[in-house]
Image: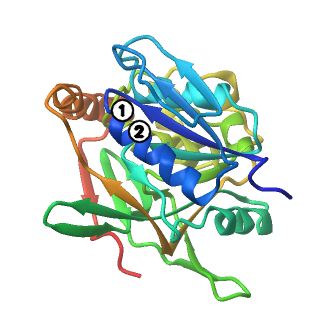
Amino acid sequence: MNWLENTAFAIKVFERPQMAQRCIKSIRRLWPDARIYAADDSKEPLPLRGLTGYIRLPFDVGCSAGRNALINGTTEPYLVHVDDDYVFTKETDIPRMIELLEAHDHLVMAGCKCRHVRKKGAGWTKYYADVTLEGGTLFARQVTRKHTEPDGLVWFEADTISNFWVAKRRLFDHVLWDERLKIGGEHADFFQRIQASNGDTAMRKRQLSNQKLRPAETSQDAGRLGVAFIPSMWVEHYKKRPPHYQPFRARDSQYERLYRQMWGITRVKRWRYGRC
């Protein structure tokens, strides 16, 4: 399989043209023939170069609506989910991620670590956990499902991973982003929807009672939707929020509260992410 012809790099962009262009450039540097798409809900269209496709959206529809637009506006069998403040490096091994997904029918998503680049150095996020909803408490626990491929690649099967991943198209037949969540809470909500599709009784019961679902999201025949985390790979993340952008980003706590109300969550208990 020619993975480049079968993969859409899907970037949600908003009000940060320089960062979005840097993300595009990093993909083109590694894979000149990559198919790169952007969904843009900035106030004015961003002057981006090097795109295969561009989706213009109404102003400030939010990251969830933009991500759904990218899913619906592309047809490739694989989709790389990426925000505009990420940069690809040689350690961002998309072909190997796809090989892993190809080798395991039940896996629909594979992600990796994030290296957060700041003025005073860099930090790491190994974000992966198993999640349960018990009453009003959401527990995020250490992952124990460890696997090793014949070539030595180690990966963990988890309920939730970081905000960078590649997925099989069939995932989106069952799970899409909830567009009520513009920014904040949308990440946890998306992965809990995967759990509900996998038959998690508590997640499914809460989802059906509190959310308006598309028909595909209530189907009983999703099959197992497995999520893999690969700790030996990473993507770089540049956390930069220009003054005109910050007020939009600062709303995340508002939407986090909405997310918790939707799922009936009153408390979250997390372990310390990333201990392999």
**Mark 2 burial class by Cα count in 10 Å: few <14, some 14-19, many 20+:** many
Residue at the location (53% across, 31% down)? 38
Q: Quick one: quadrant of the N terminus?
A: bottom right
Relative to 110, 187 lies left or right: left
Residue 102 is situated, as x and y percent measured from the top left of the image, at 78, 63
**Residue beneath label 2, please?**
20
Residue 247 is situated, as x and y percent measured from the top left of the image, at 16, 26
Relative to 77, 159 lies left or right: left
Residue at the location (30% across, 36% down)? 184
Secondary structure of the residue carrying tag 2 is: helix
Relative to 19, 49 lies left or right: right
**Residue beneath label 1, please?**
17
Q: Is 209 or 117 nearer to us in this picture?
A: 117
Tell me the distance, in whole angstroms, between the alpha carbons under discs 2 and 1: 5 Å
Residue 88 shows in the view: yes
> Vertically, is 50 above or below 140?
above
